[in-house]
Amino acid sequence: MRYDSITEAIGNTPLVRIDPAVHGLRNIDLYAKLEMLNPFGSVKDRPAWHMARPHLEGAGAGEGTVVELSSGNTAKALALLAGMHGLRFKSVTNRMRVPEIKELLLLLGAEIEELPGRSECLDPTDTDDPLTHFHQALSEPGSTYLHTDQYFNPRNVEAHAAGTGPEIVKDLDGRAPDWFVACVGTAGSSTGVARVLREHDPDVRVLGLVAHKSDFIPGIRTIDEVHQVGLFDPATYDTIESVTSGEALDGMLTLVRRCGILSGPTGGAAYQGAVRHLRDADSALDGSGRRETAVFIVCDRAESYLSYVRARRPELLGRAVRGHTLASLTEDDVRAEALSVGVEAARRRIAEGDPGPLVVDLRSPHAYAALHIEGSVNIVDELFEELVRGGLPFGKRTPVLLACPVGEKSLRYAALLTRMGHPEVRSLAGGIVAWRDAGAPLVRE
Amino acid sequence: MDVPLYLRPRVDPPLASLLGAAPFLHSLVDALGSPLNVLLPETIAENAERFRAVYRRHHLTGRVYFAHKANRSSALLRRLAAEDPAHVGVDVASPAELRHALGCGFTGDRIMATGPKDPEFLWLAARVGATVNLDSLRELDQLAELVRTYGLGRADVLVRLSGFESVDGHGGAGTRLLSRRSRFGTPVREVETVLSAVERHADAVTLTGLAYHLDTTGLAEKGRALERCVLLMDECRARGLAPRAIDIGGGFGVGYVADAEEWERWTTALSEAVLGGRPPLTWRGHGYGLRNEGGTVRGSVALYPGHRPHAGPGYLDELLSLPAPVLGRAPGTLLLEHLHDLHIEPGRALADQCGLSLARVLDVRPTGEGPDQYLVRLGMNAGDVSLEEHGVLVDPVLLPRGGPEDGGQGPVGVHLVGNLCLEADLITRRLVFLPALPRAGDLLAFVNTAGYAMDFHAHRAQRQPLARTVAVVGEGDSWRWCMDEDYWPITHPGGKPV
């Protein structure tokens, strides 16, 4: 395989059979269309290139900006395509809820505009709708924006009608599958693929999956949101069902851990939704001697969704605890082992102690820079926790006075250091707040 | 008929037990007329305590200021005046509100003057030692001039800022968080000018902090503004000023609808109705901002988010706990570590569950459109409970006269119309489902109207009676009541010392 441009590597993705031992369907062969193997990592590479190509190939170098309302994969593909052609890319969205995707977009050189939240006090006269501004800006005379308009652009659907759909038919030896399962985002892939499959066999059943209304699955819209998509036509789907983020993660885990398919949560939702729906159809086929086939789309990869997983299933990413940690201390331990000292006594120790205590301020560097106890050193608590895991960070002959905002965190660290064998650790009672309130001096540098 | 699309209200105790006392409520309306507003002053104190609990969890100091404009009641204000002065204050937006707050027992040092201010308002605020939340540079100049001319003590001021989105403008790659434009406050990019003016007026004003109020439910926008204020406070200190407080305004929200599923079902049905996939849910098919363009729903829904997982104190807790974009630490931690006080100004959220609006059913008749649809005319108009004005959708509670009837009738869809001779006078545009068809003489109780929805838009048009307001206090299994203006927190209604 030798190509002149990365765009030639878009499409022709594999169709991989899922082991029946995993999904448990006896009479239905289930296939995954691995759109995650497109060069930019997702099913959106196809429509992004198909929509942008006429503009990009005609555009002069360095002129204008490609814009799209996208929170993820379309933006990623368009940012790369724009960059290849010397253009800039801007994404406008209020759905950028996955930090890795956002950072990846920034890495690709994208500009991101996040739309404001909803108004708390309803203003019926509000004409300050950011989307309206967006569309006004696009249509201004002399504007150099290229709007790919994925939710309304028929070329989004065409990309799949020309590529994804025919590829599935070809890989099934010229037959359409009995079932096609797709998550609905822009409705581009489901509409385009369904059209082609039905041309081969009008009896293909199409299952559209949407996100459960109060839930969030990246790349899938909820049942309300699909009605706002210009490409969405209810007639495309024989059935529309909703899936939860929990099901998406279950499906993703099955694909990742048992099938060797490094799918993201959208692919997981498609798998789980497919198996859930096909179970009844499968039972009905028992004893008929017939076999059916079903195809679902794995639209992107797992790596970008680790924080999504962490927020919902932290135990999947749990790390073993090592060394000395605050977590090993109970409240009783803290009470029994920590020693604290009030502001007046602390001031005396600092002035008269021989040696005087090393004052460690556990607040953030910015707060420390603004105001701190003269002569103190700043080790921010997160760093301090890492430090003490490895052992005592200062000698046992150096007395230590720990200070945090109100003396709560420092008390816990004082208990921990005492347990680790330091003989002379104190926590500043009431913290920097008490110090300030007592009128003791604070300096800034 | 489909399954009735209820949007039943969230009703916590003691409001729930008050609704259980239907004969008592009927006797109040019999005596005082319809419409009638009922307030529970104890509840506003409990709400303030819930906000204080969030402060304690984050070890923060500072005040909870009640945004007076949410409700004009004396009872609510007097009850709050009886709270710890270090913890509870009041935010006033007009000279009359300022006078009212003083008359209800707030001393000047517990009062914050906000909004646009004319010289009389500025003078009185400075005279009584209220903190002036400065809307503009011009206001600062005016205030300083008044302080000098009339030999007043130095006035405490907060500088209100706006336009946070423009501060990290960028040429190339990056993220820009858009915000709705506000006409209040000084744009952050002009902060330098205001601080210079504060220094120039050092003989007349003392800068005690920075403030913002963003009209959004978006936590990220608020978190960004809060962090920006922390950074600016540092600049103030570097200039030798000594501000202590960051005032983050209000907008913490209220959950009106008890059940998330009812809310979701209704809003989904609205989209379907706009597309023509089901019968209208509203008077004449009103779409609440949604419209059908060639089979696709366009526009954005102009409704208050009726069910919300985090509202009021829960929302504040979430805001204080989110990591901030630049410094990385949560806003609660930033405030604490930098030794800043936190001021908040909840209006609606502090008045949550504090009151209800009662209306007598005057007339019931079929609409003539559907077999099961009725018009119910109330002794109240849209101005008395501005549910539509604020986009609040919630069912009223039916309080039959003389207890429930024989039953058997089942849910019924009604349109609630007001007492004005205007086609537009609908209490709500929504088709409301009630458990049974009401009859003339029954009461409908609109729950949770104390924040902005009680008499915010009430008017004397067509000489219909304005609602009177009573304060009620639970006493064992029964209730005592008095007129709002006669309530004092130190005596039971009737004058007996507590």
Image (cartoon, coloured by chain):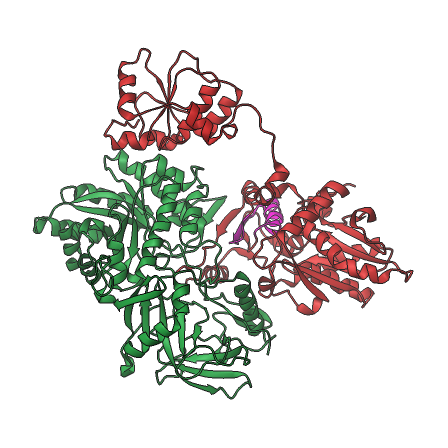
Q: Nearer the viewer, residue B191 or B326?
A: B326
Q: Is residue A75 magenta?
A: yes
Residue B327 percent location from the top left of the image = 42, 37
**Residue A434, image quadrant:** top left
Quadrant, the C terminus of chain A: top left
| Camera sees residue A122 | no
Instruction: Find residue A422 and report its image quarter.
Output: top left
A74 horizontally vs A298: left or right = left
> Measured along the vertical axis of the image, is residue A252 above or below residue B2?
above
x%, y% of residue B224? 41, 45
**Residue at left 42%, top 47%?**
B317
Q: Which of A271/B10 is in front?
A: B10
Residue furthest bottom as drawn: B368
Q: How many marks?
A: 0
Residue A127, position in %: x, y? Answer: 41, 65
Q: Is residue A12 visible?
A: yes
In front of the other: B267 or A297: B267
Q: Residue at x 18, y 57 (%)?
A: B102
Q: Identify the hue of chain A.
A: red
The residue at the far right in this view is: A289
Q: Is residue B432 magenta?
A: no
Write the start and end of the magenta stretch as one range: A71-97
* Residue B319 position within the rendered picture, expressed as x and y whole percent measured from the top left: 42, 47
B307 with respect to B147 (left or right): right
Chain B, chosen colour in render: green
Q: Which quadrant is the N terminus of chain A positioned in?
A: top right
Considering only vertical position in the picture, is A335 above or below A303?
A: above
Q: Quadrant of residue A52?
A: bottom right
Position of residue B488 in the picture relative to residue B281 (left or right): left
